[in-house]
Amino acid sequence: MSGSIQDTFFEECEDLLEAMDEGLTAIEGGEHDQEVVNAIFRAVHSIKGGAGAFGLDELVGFAHKFETVFDELRSGKLEFDTALIQLLLRSSDHLADLVANARDGGTTDQAHHDVLIEALAKYIPEEEEDLTFEPMGLSGAFAPEPIMDDSEKTFEIRFHPLKEMYGTGNEPFFLFQALSELGELSVRLDDSELPGFDTIDAEESYLAWNLTLITKDSQDSIEAVFEFVEGLCELTISSDADPAEEADALAALNAAFGTDAEPTADAGQPDPFEQPAPAKEAEVSAPVEEKASLPKTETAKTEQRGPKPTLRVDLERVDRLINAVGELIINHSMLAQQIANLDAGDVRDVETELEGFKNLARDIQEGVMSIRAQPVKPLFQRMARIVREASSATGKTAKLVTEGEATEVDKTVIERLSDPLTHILRNAVDHGIEKPEGREEAGKDKAGEIRLSASHRSGSVCIEIRDDGAGVNRPRVKQIAIDKGLIPENAELTDSEIDNLLFLPGFSTAKEVSNLSGRGVGMDVVKNAVTGLGGRINISSTPGKGSTFTIILPLTLAVMDGMVVSVADQTMVVPITSIVETMRGSDEMINNLGADGTLLSIRGNFVPICDVAGALGLRQCHDQPPGVYLLVETETGQRSALAVDDIFDQRQVVIKSLDGVCGNIPGVAAATILGDGKIAMILDPESIIAASPSAAAFDTERRISNAIAS
Amino acid sequence: MQSQAEVKQVDHEVKHTQFSEFVSFSVAGQAFCLKITQIREIRRWSPVTILPHAPSDVLGVMNLRGAVIPIYDLSARFGLEQTEASERNVVIVVAVHGKQVGLLAESVSEIISINPEEIQDTPQVDSRNTMEYIQGIISHNESMVRIINLDAVITAPEQVLL
């Protein structure tokens, strides 16, 4: 039970950290809006509150310090400056680490932790620092330490839950149970608001409770019980026992600290976090509400913080649905084919209905797919941190500018993009951006800029990482490749071919191995990750101006548009995204080159022909000239003509992974099930060309791997 | 692993119930059998989709209600001649290593009940493959039926094919 609540807490933490990052990014961008500061404060506060409940002391302690600084900022006692913003950014990173450590059981970098605590403490006024922290306090961070004495006090508590409280699954009984553990509790139900049966709204909350608690504990402990329904109920707590002494002492404390914490947390307090206000009010810091509203807001400034209801669903369920919809579409095609083959007279009516069925199925499919689609924003926000860390580790100044954060991509793609992006960005800082002095010499701004953008581009997602650094040092890259024996010494490579050498396994350009990059796991890992997602990665670079990595990814991993072709009597599918043009060939278009090379002439250009059947080992002899050519472009910009026997149709196909069915087959990316129930291979043009002997001579990678082999 | 445990469990049961049921079928003219609990279904052969660069004993893949399952030619797997698959042949779908695979056989013969005590160890022969693939032999209607060791015939998923 507690495990699952803890899981929920960590899930919420993800959202809260995201909100915090978002706010900090806004502040870094010069937006010192009160609302932004409040948003961050709330996020940190909620993390602290939850962490306190689970006894994560280290996290609580740090969050408290962090939060206090924000409270100072909020109350205008502290002004933003560059150093502070940097510190806050570091602290937010550290907070994320602490959360991750608490979740995954890692260990904290104690030195770093202490440094940050100390740095934060500098911004916190002395007297507040002296206060002992009470993590569960409803009255926020600065409540004076309650006076503890052994005498029993009587608290009158009025508790009126709002209907939202029931909506979040809270149960008054458990709250009362928790209270009764503190002391002697008597509960009276107040049903005066209850209307008659004819007017009752079953979902409304009419009941209130008047509780009397006799306890030795402080008011804080009582408030702690109501921590999780904060903002979801109307709550008044008043202590009427032993009034004189305590009130005096409190008054004295209040005077000393200038805070207005009173024994009764009544609704008139100015601080939005301390008032148990109805949930409709936007500023309530109830964690449950923030969970719903924060991830959806575009920026804290522009969008109303209204709760937009969201639903957490087990990903597996969505996947099952996606599979079922995929089957539905296959089933439709099968049905259509059966009807077409039917020897019945007039099937037009049936076909019309079938068309409607098809449209519905497509609608469902799109709907289900959109469940999995998520904006890249959280991913991009994490990347800001990577750049920050990388630049401080290398002593360079670089800032990340993100664009198109609202672009939605399949969840799995987002998850699996994290590592390659991290790697590219680290490389961009480590190798791309020059040292500040170097930049000034080159007449550039001292701070480097890395632009991370996402956009939809004709059925695929394009992610671009552009830095304004020095660009690829081509002579050096080539020399390294030669030194490492990756290419022969006399290799003549074009600029783009040299740039793409970076993606070769075991290539690392760093002169010395640094902490960040150059650990031998190079860009080939990035490339594998991207191709593993069915995507392509390309690099282009201008010396002195910078480099651009372009990652093209399919919108979804489950369905794609394919061209249905036939190859050696087998039906196969070629991804539409890689096809530039299709044409029916004739004898005069084919030109022989040397012993086994054939070129196709297209409007005066000669493109190497790659026989798909041959490359797949399905047919060896070239006696019958294939009928149709698919002009494809590889990621290096190299064009090839794939020769197939015939071309049938263009249609959406559901991708079925061949993992576990058989190992990796060169030239085949996956499989799909066609309308007739038959399985068709989905081809991977890139690797077909690599596997084709006649095209090999034109492909850098092949040439290079030949060189390795020899 | 799972199926191994299954097999052990079945063996255990066999001792108590005395008889267990096997499905016998013919491959390249020889009689083989599999425990009935290992078999998911038996289908008529229909042309499969060829897997490029596949070894000769892997015929291709087949659509089994939306799942892509590989089909092996048992005969080629045992080192016998390749089966010329036709409509008369059958595909025996078995579950092994938590996956489903299809095995092409000439034809299914019958279900036979075997007393575990009747199972004889495979006699020592030269062929290593045979020793590995055959768990034991039984005499049924005066002919020899070979019990297939499915775990050995179909290796774990990561080793399949490549």
Image (cartoon, coloured by chain):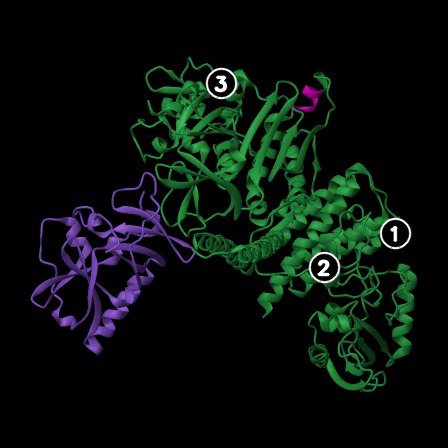
Q: Which residues are magenta?
A: A434-439
Instruction: In the rendered structure, find residue A619 and report the number of the disc placed on it.
Output: none
Q: Which marked residue is nearer to the observer: mark 1 or mark 3?
A: 3
Instruction: In the rendered structure, find residue A292 and report the number of the disc placed on it.
Output: 2
Chain painted in green in the figure:
A
What is the chain identity of the residue bearing mark 3?
A
> Which colour denotes chain B?
purple
Q: Residues within 10 Å of mark 1 (few under 14, many from 20)?
A: few
Q: Residues within 10 Å of mark 2 (few under 14, many from 20)?
A: many
Which residue ends up furthest to the top in the rendered image?
A490
Instruction: In the rendered structure, find residue A75 and report the number of the disc placed on it.
Output: 1
| A220 with respect to A2 (left or right) | right
Residue at screen point 59% across, 38% down: A421
Q: Secondary structure at mark 2?
A: helix
Task: Say whether disc 1 or disc 2 marks the residue closer to the N-terminus.
Answer: 1
Residue A479 locus on image (x, y percent): 48, 17
